Amino acid sequence: MPERNLPFFEMFAKYHPAPALAAQLETWLVTGAVMDSHSRTIEVKLLCTDLPAPALLDQVGREVSQIYGLRGVTFRPACPQVPAGVEEPMPPPPGEEDAPPPPEDADVPPMEAAVPPAWEAPPAPAAEPAPAPEEPAGGPAPPEEDLSQQEKLFRQTEAMRQQAMKAAMAAHKEARGFSSQRIYGIRQIKKAPKPMNTLELDMGVVTVEGDVFAVEHRELKKRNAWVISFDITDYTSSIRVSKFMPGDEGTPIVNGVKVGMHLKISGRLNLNRFDNDMVLEPLIIETAEKTVKQDNAPEKRVELHLHTKMSLMDALTDTKDAVKRAIQWGHPAVAITDHGVAQSFPDAWSAGKGKCKVLLGTEAYYINNVDERLTVRGEQDQDLDEPIVCFDLETTGLSKETDVITEIGAVVLDHGEVKERFQTFVDPQRKLAPNIVQLTGITDEMLVGAPSQAEAIQAFLDFAAGRPLAAHNAEFDIGFIRTGCQRYGIEFQPTFVDTLPLAQNLLPELSKYKLDVVCRHLNLPDFNHHRASDDAAMVGYMLVPFIRMLRDRGAHPPAGEPGPGQEQLPGQGQTDAQASGGAGQEPNRAAEPL
């Protein structure tokens, strides 16, 4: 490759002046340069076809200084033109011993002596001839010997310049706190970050720091622009970083910002007219070091109760991240105990393999499907033929905590016969809902002057006189009586028979076990369903064939001492939803809230 002087725009490639000025600068050749690292200035020697005006040199020097972040650039031009009146070509330059001393200049650094002007260079050795560089436009080129030697000297000077530039830039970076991790902007972020939950629109320029959790940049190809947009959080709140950027201005952000990065951003708070929300328009974006909690305990703990995102509605922890954090902290083991699932086991096992022992566990659910389906509950001992009080309630709704009783009906079943009867309305101290009136036939007028809740419950218990009770889906009716007794300070410790699980075990051929369905299957007479007195009587009539079936199966012990396969028969294969004929409904109360 032929040796040549360095064109001006090869040394200052970032400088882009106006076309007219650029055409003139293209004729300039750089023959030497000296940088002062302390003052951050450069002195450049030029070879020009014509000597440029001082104002032009000052203008170019200011613009180059601004682009490269220097305090000053001084140009020393030289012109190789033949002096006026001389017709012969320029004679060879004198030898080094005859060369005049350089002019004294207080602003020239001591290194100046190492960079002689083009016309003061010694002749090149005869053994290393080189072709002359191309003649610059607008004037004759220097002699071939001079250009070859100048190139060698220039390269030596260029190496010194590069070294000085690196030293100056390093000092400049250290002085300004320059971050090599800066993604966007030219300055350092010096302000302390503000918590995102304190940001207000009138705060102007602020600094935030957090994790990027969503990136949604949009390229506007027709406008040759980008709308950069990403979301960042510091876990006190979140904010969207968004700005319209023409041309390639947004490219560093598009290429540099990714989900999961920890960034420090300085920008201006503004109102986005498209989202009608506050956004942060970035001025400077830097990566930042995220503070990670450390476990410095000399004896490491073992986490035995860790929930992951596989636990429904309970945790957001990623399984692999949790195990990796335990490894980072030096924990010897970690236990996964999700709620009733094992989906996190594979990820946990692969993440801890060979580095941390993973204990696989679960928080299992215990469902007692026996106690809740007992036929007889309570401590009282009695033969099945002795008196049993069969009862039913009508209420204002299904909740024993918020609803109240409107009617109580009861009968006494004694040796298979219905003997005594009890019926009373109860004042609910509220108006009845239209659907309740339509279902039961009980109106507000029928309840005027009825006993209060406490009086009616006490009257029913006086009628029962401590005898065992019976009801269809007894937990519903017993629940209302028990809640009322607790509310009014009445003692209530009943023994009762639930005909719902009894029907489920004795009549497995049925698909529904509502009171009217079971009575119809047993060929019992029609009755006014959803009235307490009639429903109570049908419970008594239903118990007669049930007791007979139990005796046929050998059920003889007292009610308080159940034997295998006898009175206390748990529900077998039936759920509350099946008993009521629909999923998620109260057994036998799907259509009768009373």
Image (cartoon, rainbow, N blue to C red):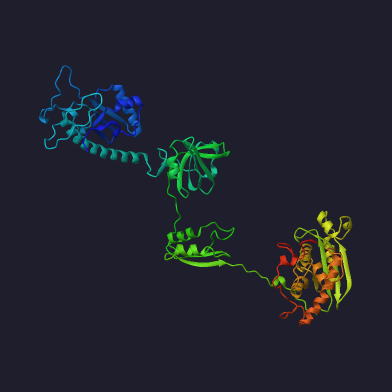
State the quadrant of the N terminus.
top left
Residue 255 in the figure: left or right of residue 392 = left
Quadrant position of residue 507: bottom right
Quadrant position of residue 93: top left
Residue 457 in the figure: left or right of residue 59 = right
In depth, the one of 383 and 302 nearer the eye is 383
In the displayed structure, 561 sits above or below 142; it is below
In depth, the one of 464 and 297 nearer the eye is 464
In depth, the one of 546 and 469 nearer the eye is 546
Q: What percent of the width, then of the height, locates residue 11? A: 29, 34
Q: What percent of the width, then of the height, locates residue 41? A: 29, 32
* Residue 39 showing in the rendered view: no
Q: What percent of the width, then of the height, locates residue 329? A: 44, 60
In the displayed structure, 497 sits above or below 201; it is below
Residue 52 in the figure: left or right of residue 99 = right
Residue at the image point whose x is 40% and y is 38% from the top: 187
Quadrant position of residue 407: bottom right
In the displayed structure, 266 sits above or below 463; it is above
State the quadrant of the C terminus.
bottom right
In depth, the one of 435 and 164 nearer the eye is 435
